[in-house]
């Protein structure tokens, strides 16, 4: 009898401990849920604060000029596309399409040229031994550290002597000749992280250096090259100072200058036109970024971590 | 098919470090030559010089009748299998195999036909449309082998091709490669092979001849059997064979070898073979030839220090005049042994004793060749 009651005591104690453990687990789960909700709320809040100007920009581009300053919210009370229609026409003889085309004429050769030239230079630095290699690579790093503004005046004089002022050439030719040390450096780091066995195998297979580069190295470099192209695309799209210095004819303005133009020429600023054109200006960069986001991150992180 | 000759081949790095010291080596047509040695012995450097991936500082490399020193790797008539396969990661197996042929100017149809043939030989047909990252180690190794095979080169070069595989796969790949070599030879195809490894089992089981290297020098070139039974020097004696050969220091005195207080009778045949009687000598005897003795006559006494049970046999480690020696006993012998004693009696087989000059390392007791 005693034995049985003892056993039932043990059983009850066991059941109590189990119930306690379950209760404890429930509390923990609840805490984790509350903590997650809190974290996401903070993230959402901060994210919203950071993105609000952009959201407001898009909203305001559909407002009337009067409403922009009257209504701090981003949803327009009377949505209108007047900003886009009038903004597109611009106050010049050209439409905004012309300025987009100009930007495109700079970006295309610059991006392609950068990808090709930087790959060749980086391949040379990463894989070959040649006289003065260390000094030359040192100067690449030195250029990387040099503030852009230092070279503006000598470059301006050089391009003036070449007769390149008021043309697109000063804006893309230096980059297309591996003038952007940052990209060379980035690709060198990326290449150093790739073992050279495949290239040796290619040499044994009969490839010369160019064939090795084209058939074996470039495909492996693809993520880094996509990053290079994206960076170059965005930086060129956003570049204001370069075109401002070298381009003087309105018919050659890229979008960055054209935006400024609409502020200059109107006495009472038509803000909704400016905002509408700003939205159009950032659209290509955003679209390209979201499309290539995966490669972009892969490219910069691979270079950074492995290098 | 072609023979490969190295003449006074040297490699100096940065004008200071001499990695390869003027080596001479002849690899006959259709021969499977294994370069073996510890890491840093320049076996891979030698192979890479033959491949053209490393510049030659001095000397000559001949493949067939051509001196290939300055030729590009692709023009030397060689194919190489790399340690980590080096398959092109962005190409499917099919394209990987065909790549060399296509670069060499073969048409698409020719390359496709060759790919089918090679895939059949290596049983990789189901893998042709996979990417290298979708292959297991053994599969990748076979594809790498196929990439070499498809080129029908004069000389195959292997750079430690099995070292990334697990033991079981390595054993089966060993057989596969030697079978393939025999098959090519039978069919009269290119089959001269230079195979680099640090694994003596690979060397002994695969090579027609083995070239043992140390610090950029060739120590001995011989058949596996000859290397085992007739090591030219102390290094080869110690490097080839498992467990390692026992080396007992002492000196030759008439027909006997004296070490500490003990005497080993060398026997008539061995004594007459000696080309020198070095003051500082070493007696080499493989553990397999140092047997457990039951009597006292002619036996050496040693203190038992440890026992390693290997299954069918037992390694006994003992101290002989302060130097460790190993002997191999069968499991049955070990069972019969009186294990209460910590002294064992060892009997060296006179026919398998080697005498080395400790200063030069040379074996002064080699049998006449032939």
Image (spheres, rainbow, N blue to C red):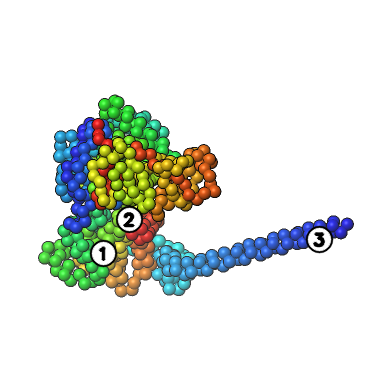
Sooner in the amino-acid sequence: mark 1 or mark 2: 1
Residue drawn at the location 25% of the way across and 46% of the way down: B277
Q: Position of residue B156 (x, y in %)?
A: 27, 37
Q: Position of residue B119 (x, y in %)?
A: 36, 32
- Asked if one can make out residue B211 in the rendered structure from this viewpoint, the answer is no
Badge 1 and badge 2 both on one subunit: yes
Disc 3 from disc 1: Cα separation: 94 Å
Q: Reply above or below: A96 against B245.
A: below
Q: Which residue in the structure is indicated by mark 2?
A: A193
Dot 1: chain letter:
A
> Considering the numbered disc 2 on the image, is that residue within a helix, a strand or a loop?
loop
> Callout 2: few (<14), some (14-19), or many (20+) C-alpha neighbours within 10 Å?
some
For residue A73, the mark is none
For residue A92, the mark is 1
Dot 2: chain letter:
A
Q: Which residue in the structure is indicated by mark 3?
A: A9
> Considering the numbered disc 1 on the image, is that residue within a helix, a strand or a loop?
loop
Disc 1 from disc 2: Cα separation: 51 Å
């Amino acid at each position: 009898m005693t034995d049985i009651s003892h056993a039932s005591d043990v059983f009850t104690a066991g059941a109590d401990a189990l119930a306690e453990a379950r209760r404890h687990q429930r509390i923990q789960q609840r805490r984790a849920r509350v903590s997650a909700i809190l974290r996401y709320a903070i993230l959402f809040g901060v994210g919203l604060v950071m993105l609000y100007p952009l959201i407001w920009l898009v909203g305001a581009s559909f407002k009337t000029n009067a409403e922009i300053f009257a209504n701090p919210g981003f949803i327009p009370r009377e949505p209108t596309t007047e900003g886009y229609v009038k903004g597109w026409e611009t106050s010049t003889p050209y439409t905004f399409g012309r300025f987009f085309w100009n930007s495109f004429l700079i970006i295309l050769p610059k991006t392609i040229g950068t990808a090709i030239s930087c790959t060749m230079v980086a391949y040379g630095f990463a894989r070959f031994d040649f006289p003065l290699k260390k000094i030359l690579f040192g100067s690449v790093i030195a250029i990387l550290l040099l503030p852009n503004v230092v070279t503006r005046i000598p470059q301006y004089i050089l391009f003036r002597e070449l007769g390149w002022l008021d043309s697109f050439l000063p804006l893309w030719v230096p980059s297309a000749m591996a003038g952007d040390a940052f990209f060379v450096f980035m690709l060198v780091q990326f290449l150093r992280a790739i073992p050279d066995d495949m290239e040796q195998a290619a040499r044994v297979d009969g490839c010369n250096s160019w064939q090795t580069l084209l058939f074996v190295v470039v495909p492996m470099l693809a993520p880094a090259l996509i990053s290079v192209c994206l960076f170059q695309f965005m930086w060129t799209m956003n570049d204001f100072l370069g075109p401002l210095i070298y381009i003087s004819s309105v018919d050659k303005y890229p979008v960055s200058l054209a935006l400024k133009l609409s502020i200059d020429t109107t006495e009472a600023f038509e803000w909704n036109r400016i905002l509408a054109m700003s939205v159009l200006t950032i659209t290509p960069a955003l679209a390209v970024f979201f499309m290539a986001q995966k490669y972009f991150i892969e490219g910069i992180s691979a270079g950074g971590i492995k290098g | 098919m072609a023979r490969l000759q190295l003449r006074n081949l040297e490699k100096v790095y940065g004008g200071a470090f001499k990695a390869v010291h003027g080596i001479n080596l002849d690899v006959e047509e259709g021969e499977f030559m294994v370069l073996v040695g510890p890491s840093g012995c320049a076996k891979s450097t030698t192979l890479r010089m033959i491949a053209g991936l490393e510049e030659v500082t001095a000397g000559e490399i001949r493949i067939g009748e051509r001196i290939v020193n300055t030729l590009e790797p692709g023009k030397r008539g060689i194919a190489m299998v790399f340690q980590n396969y080096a398959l092109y990661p962005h190409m499917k197996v099919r394209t990987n195999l065909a790549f060399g042929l296509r670069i060499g100017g073969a048409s698409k149809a020719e390359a496709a036909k060759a790919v089918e043939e090679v895939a059949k030989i290596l049983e990789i047909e189901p893998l042709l449309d996979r990417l290298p990252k979708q292959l297991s180690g053994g599969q990748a190794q076979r594809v790498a082998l196929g990439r070499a095979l498809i080129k029908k080169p004069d000389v195959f070069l292997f750079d430690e091709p099995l070292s990334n595989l697990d033991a079981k796969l390595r054993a089966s790949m060993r057989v596969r490669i030697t079978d393939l070599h025999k098959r090519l030879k039978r069919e009269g195809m290119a089959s001269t092979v230079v195979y680099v490894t640090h694994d003596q089992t690979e060397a002994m089981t695969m090579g027609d001849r083995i070239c043992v290297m140390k610090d950029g020098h060739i120590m001995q070139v011989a058949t596996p059997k000859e290397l085992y039974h007739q090591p030219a020097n102390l290094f080869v004696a110690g490097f080839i064979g498992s467990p390692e050969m026992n080396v007992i220091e002492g000196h030759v005195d008439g027909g006997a070898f004296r070490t500490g207080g003990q005497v080993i009778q060398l026997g008539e045949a061995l004594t007459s073979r000696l080309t020198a009687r070095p003051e500082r000598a070493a007696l080499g005897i493989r553990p397999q030839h140092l047997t457990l003795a039951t009597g006292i006559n002619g036996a050496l006494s040693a203190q038992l220090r440890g026992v390693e049970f290997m299954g069918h046999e037992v390694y006994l480690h003992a101290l002989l005049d302060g130097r460790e020696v190993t002997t191999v006993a069968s499991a049955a012998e070990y069972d019969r042994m009186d294990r209460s004693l910590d002294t064992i009696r060892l009997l060296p087989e006179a026919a398998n004793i080697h005498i080395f000059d400790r200063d030069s390392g040379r074996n002064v007791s080699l049998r006449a060749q032939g």
